[in-house]
Every structure is written in structure tokens, then in C-alpha cells.
Image (cartoon, rainbow, N blue to C red):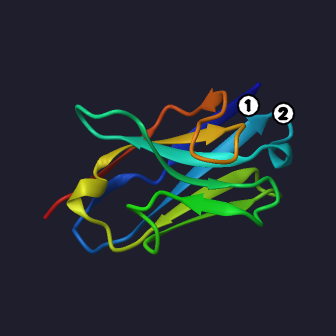
Amino acid sequence: QVQLVESGGGLVQPGGSLRLSCAASGRTFGNYAMGWFRQAPGKEREFVATISWSGSVTYYADSVKGRFTISRDNAKNTVYLQMNSLKPEDTALYYCNAGRLGPRPGDYWGQGTQVTVSS
């Protein structure tokens, strides 16, 4: 089992930045690919970004490419999502996920952290 706890969400103006964190506990964090997903009201949950266990491979959704950066610190059991140039359409509940590299989610989810982009 892997337990995931997200933090760092909040209210930000368009064009602003936020950094989300996901702290993991349980089984060896460094063995898992990690990802971020998001779900806006009335929409399906969608893939945002993913990173390999070593951090050497990353993939992004087209909608966030060039604006968001996923990274990890295996010594701190933490994965990050740096979000720049935020847009109102980025407003969603952001979830951390563990277990699979790529746009399909793995087995483990956090509880989510809300990001609201509004003036």
C-alpha cells in the first residue's frame, strides 16, 4: 500500500503560479512511477503529468505542456507539480497518483487538493 497526501492548492489569479506537493508513505516510494490527474466540475478525471521512478522520463497532457513541470525527490518521498501561467480552465481538483507511467492511472490515489484560477 502507498498513502498519498497532496498539498499546495489554493486560489490564484490567471497568469499566476502554484506548486503542488504529494507526500507518500508506505511501500518504497522510489519504486513507483507517479502522476498528477485533475477533475473539473462536471467533467471526467483527466491526465495531467507523469514521471518515472528515477525522474528521468516525464510526459504531459498537451493542455499543460510548457506550463507545468512534474518532478520528484525520492529522498523526501515527494512528487511536485509546478504550475505556471495558470488559466481559468486549469481550475480543478488535482489528484496525486502512484503506480503507472503514462496517461492511465495506477492503483493509488490521494484525496485531492483544489486549485482555483480566477480574478
Examine the image and state in which quarter residue 100 appears: top right
Quick one: SS at disc 1? strand
Mark 2 or mark 1, which has the lower sequence index? Answer: 1
Q: Nearer the viewer, residue 12 or 63?
A: 63
How far across and down, in percent of the image, does residue 10 sit? 33, 53
Tag 2 residue: 27
Instruction: Decide: is 118 above or below 27.
Output: below
Relative to residue 55, is residue 63 drawn left or right?
left
Q: Which residue is at a point 78% across and 43% down the rendered structure image?
A: 32
Quick one: SS at disc 2? loop
The image quadrant where one finds the C terminus is bottom left
How far across and down, in percent of the image, does residue 49 sit? 55, 55
The image quadrant where one finds the N terminus is top right
* Tag 2–tag 1 contact (CB < 8 Å): yes
Tag 1 residue: 2
Query: Label 1 is placed on what type of residue?
Result: Val
